[in-house]
């Protein structure tokens, strides 16, 4: 018996060490599987700095070239001078695929840094397709008004405004800007009646201050671009403000970005239809 007790006393620490090692390995494996993918620093500064008119112009031109013609055209026009861009755009319009463009010709001599930047920006536009024609839709039909107030003080500077307010009449229907899954429904203090949709792109699309949530919605439900979300109201901390939709976009890493540049383009696409 004493021999057995001595054996257990000697072995016990090793079992504890092994158990701790197993738990640590499992923890780090779980962290690796559930790790939020990092977003390169150049993505959203580029996307949100593009002039709306330039985006719409590139979309119109690109539609006549190929399925990625909008991204090809926008990457070129947003990087190079008009004189440089015209030679590459002429190649695209003649049927040359982007991957076979001639960057060095008798009249066009681009630096390697310029070529890399055009290719990188095209990659960003395709990977984060906010400006892909018909990929997204403006959330409020009918007569609306909105401006860029992202980052403005709220509650006396205690927090900042992390979205865009779109003003319209109470009861105006709201629609989903994209396809995805319903992730959150119901009341919270700031947003009042709100709906959160996890888009196919991984971003979280937030609709707040609703008068009424579409009663057929439930958490985990698939939703399509253009499906009814609810109606405009002034619930939550918007109780004393004019009726409006607070629309926000949260990235997978938890960062809220300014939706105004995207909304502007989606609205112009709606008006052009």
Image (cartoon, rainbow, N blue to C red):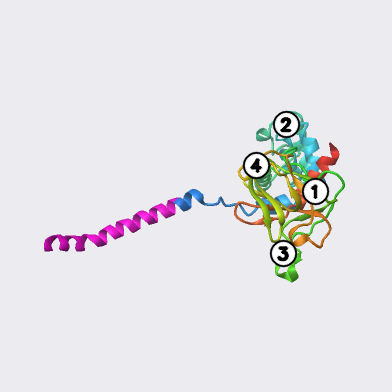
Q: Is tag 3's residue or tag 1's residue first in the polypeptide sequence?
A: 3
Res. 182 in view: yes
What's the magenta region?
A: 1-29
**Distance Cα–Cα, label 2 vs label 3:** 41 Å
Q: Comparing marks 2 and 3, which lies closer to the viewer?
A: 3
The residue wearing badge 4 is 180
**Distance Cα–Cα, label 4 vs label 1:** 21 Å
Q: In what element is the residue under mark 2?
A: loop
Q: Comparing marks 4 and 2, which lies closer to the viewer?
A: 4
**Residue sitting at x 74%, y 33%:** 92
The question of residue 155 being in magenta is answered with no
Position of 188 compared to 211: left or right? left
Q: Which numbered marker is on residue 160?
A: 3
- Farthest residue to the top: give it: 95
Q: Is tag 2's residue or tag 1's residue first in the polypeptide sequence?
A: 2
**Distance Cα–Cα, label 2 vs label 1:** 24 Å
Q: Quadrant of residue 122?
A: top right
The residue wearing badge 2 is 66
Q: Is tag 4's residue or tag 2's residue first in the polypeptide sequence?
A: 2
Position of 244 compared to 38: left or right? right
- Farthest residue to the bottom: give it: 156
Label 4: how many Cα within 10 Å (few below 14, some 14–19, many 20+) = many
The residue wearing badge 1 is 264
Task: Using the image, determine if residue 6 lies above or below residue 46.
Answer: below
Q: Nearer the viewer, residue 247 or 262?
A: 247
Measuring from the top left, give residue 1's x and y in whole percent: 12, 61
**Residue sitting at x 77%, y 55%:** 164
Label 3: how many Cα within 10 Å (few below 14, some 14–19, many 20+) = some
């Amino acid at each position: 018996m004493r021999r057995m007790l001595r054996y257990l006393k000697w072995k016990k620490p090793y079992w504890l060490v092994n158990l701790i090692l197993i738990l640590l390995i499992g923890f780090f494996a779980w962290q690796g599987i559930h790790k939020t993918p990092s977003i390169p620093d150049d993505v959203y500064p580029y996307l949100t700095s593009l002039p709306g008119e330039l985006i719409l112009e590139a979309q119109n031109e690109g539609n006549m070239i190929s399925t990625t013609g909008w991204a090809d055209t926008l990457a070129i026009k947003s990087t190079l001078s008009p004189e440089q861009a015209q030679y590459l755009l002429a190649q695209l319009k003649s049927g040359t695929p982007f991957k076979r463009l001639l960057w060095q010709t008798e009249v066009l001599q681009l630096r390697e840094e310029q070529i890399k930047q055009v290719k990188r920006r095209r990659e960003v536009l395709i990977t984060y397709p906010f400006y892909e024609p018909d990929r997204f839709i403006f959330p409020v039909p009918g007569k609306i008004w909105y401006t860029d107030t992202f980052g403005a003080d709220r509650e006396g500077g205690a927090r900042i405004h992390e979205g865009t307010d779109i003003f319209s009449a109470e009861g105006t229907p709201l629609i989903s800007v994209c396809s995805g899954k319903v992730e959150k429904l119901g009341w919270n203090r700031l947003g009042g009646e709100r709906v959160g949709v996890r888009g196919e792109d991984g971003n979280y699309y937030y609709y707040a201050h609703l008068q009424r949530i579409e009663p057929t919605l439930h958490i985990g439900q698939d939703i399509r671009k253009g499906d009814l979300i609810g109606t405009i109201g002034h619930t939550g901390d918007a109780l004393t403000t004019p009726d409006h939709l607070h629309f926000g976009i949260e990235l997978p890493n938890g960062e809220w970005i300014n939706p105004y540049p995207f909304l502007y383009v989606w609205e112009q696409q709606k008006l052009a239809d």
